[in-house]
Every structure is written in C-alpha cells, then in structure tokens.
Amino acid sequence: MARLKAGVLISGSGTNLQALLDAAGVPNYPAEIVLVVSNSGDAPGLERARTAGVPTRVIDHRDFSDRAAFDGALGSALRDAGCELVCLAGFMRLLTAGFVESWRDRLINIHPSLLPSFKGLDAQAQALAAGVRIAGCTVHFVRPEMDSGPIIVQGAAPVLEGDDAASLAARILQVEHRIYPLALRLIGEGRVSVDGDVVTIAGGRPAATGTLIWPAENALA
Ligand code: GRF
C-alpha cells in the first residue's frame, strides 16, 4: 500500500521530527516524511532531516511582507513535494486561518499539555503553577484557534516533587516522542476519522495499559 506523504514544519531542535523520521525508517510504517520546512535556517532539526536523507527547505518568515504571503509560500512548498498531511513539530509561527482551513483534517500538531488545559507558550510552567499531579501531551488536528482541534492521541506524565519547568518538559518530551509517531501511524493506516470536535479511531481494542494514579497508592510511606 502507498505510504502517506507527510511534510513536517519545524523551528528548532526537532526532537519530535527525529521521532517521526525514526518511525518512518521502520519497514511497514504507513507514512513517509517527504519534506521538512523550517522558518529558520539555524534550526538544528534541519540537520536531522539531512542526515535522514529527507529534502529540506528554509522559508524565512522575515522575507515576507505579511503572514498570508509566508503561508502561501509554505503551502506551495508542501504541495510541490506532494504532501498529503502536514505535521507541526515545534513550529513557532502562528498560521493564518486560510492556511489552516486549506489543510483541514490534514494538519496536525503536538502540544506539551493535556489539552484543552494549558494552551499557548510555557505549557509545562502553566501546569506546575496550576499544581496538577498529572501532566502530558496531545497530538491534535489543527483549527484556526491556537492549540485547539480534535484530539488524536494523548499521553500522561506525572509531576514529581521538586520539578521545575525544565525537568517536567524533559519528562513530557519522552512521551511526545512516543505519541507523535503513533498518531501519524494511525492516520497513515486510515483509522482516524473526525466528526465535529471528536476523533474516532477504528479497530482499537480495549486498552491493556493501566490507570495512572499519582501519587501512586503503593508509593506512600
Ligand atoms: C515540543 O515540546 C512540542 O510539544 C512543542 O514544541 C516542542 C518542540 O520540541 N510544540 P522539538 O523541536 O520537537 O524538540
């Protein structure tokens, strides 16, 4: 079966991009990364793509007079590469509603919180400030309103005593690297459908994984 052609937009280190590249390198994975675009020529993630042999483009937002023109160039690059799906992976530019609608249900994002909690920047610091015991991350279809849209996969991580934003972010990032490839796999397998605000995943079985209760009942003196 043909593999789903995905483009990835990045701005920075690209560890989630790396997780997607690694997954796509495994035989029988149902998606391939055909293009990586960065809005910054300095993004370390570009080197990850080159190492994996994936074509890269730098489209610098500062070269465009407005967001619509920048998004137009992004769209052209993605279409020219034959992308059927676009993955945002630490892409730090807001996209216009026109761009988002033109990729409706074909544009996904990863965010380091259990949405709809803690949208926007510094989600991990927001989680600490709110005192939640369980944090996590979300892969979702993108809608024009920032960090909103139908949820595909979520993963949880405990908040530990003494955590700061950096230590919590590192723990959540480990989970991100598992759920982003999972979400892309589910879409590539054609299992994911969207009905209004809700995603349905076909062929799921009752979960074998346990419930996360934190602090754990057996971990208290
Ligand atoms: C991740 O925490 C992701 O959830 C957020 O931006 C960060 C990107 O990290 N959207 P990386 O570039 O994938 O390492």
Image (cartoon, rainbow, N blue to C red):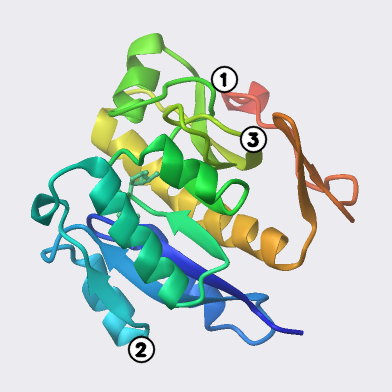
**Is the residue under label 2 in contact with that under label 3 (CB below 8 Å)?**
no
* Image disc number at residue 150: 3
Q: Would you say residue 110 is visible in this rendering?
A: no
In the displayed structure, 195 sits above or below 12; it is above
Mark positioned earlier in the residue sequence (3 or 2): 2
Amino acid tagged 3: Pro
Along the viewing direction, whichever of 198 and 211 lies nearer the viewer? 198
Q: Residue at x 25, y 50 (%)?
A: 69
The residue under label 1 is 220
Amino acid tagged 2: Gly
Q: Secondary structure at mark 1?
A: loop
Would you call the spot at circle 1 few (<14 residues within 10 Å), some (14-19), or many (20 or more)? few
Work out how far the residue at label 2 is from the one at label 1, CA to CA, in angstroms.
Answer: 49 Å
Quadrant where the N terminus is found in the figure: bottom right
Work out how far the residue at label 3 is from the one at label 2, CA to CA, in angstroms.
Answer: 32 Å
The residue under label 2 is 53
In the displayed structure, 100 sits above or below 221; it is below
Q: Is mark 1 within 8 Å of ligand 1?
A: no
Amino acid tagged 1: Leu
Find residue 189 and report its horizontal and vertical position in percent.
Answer: 75, 67
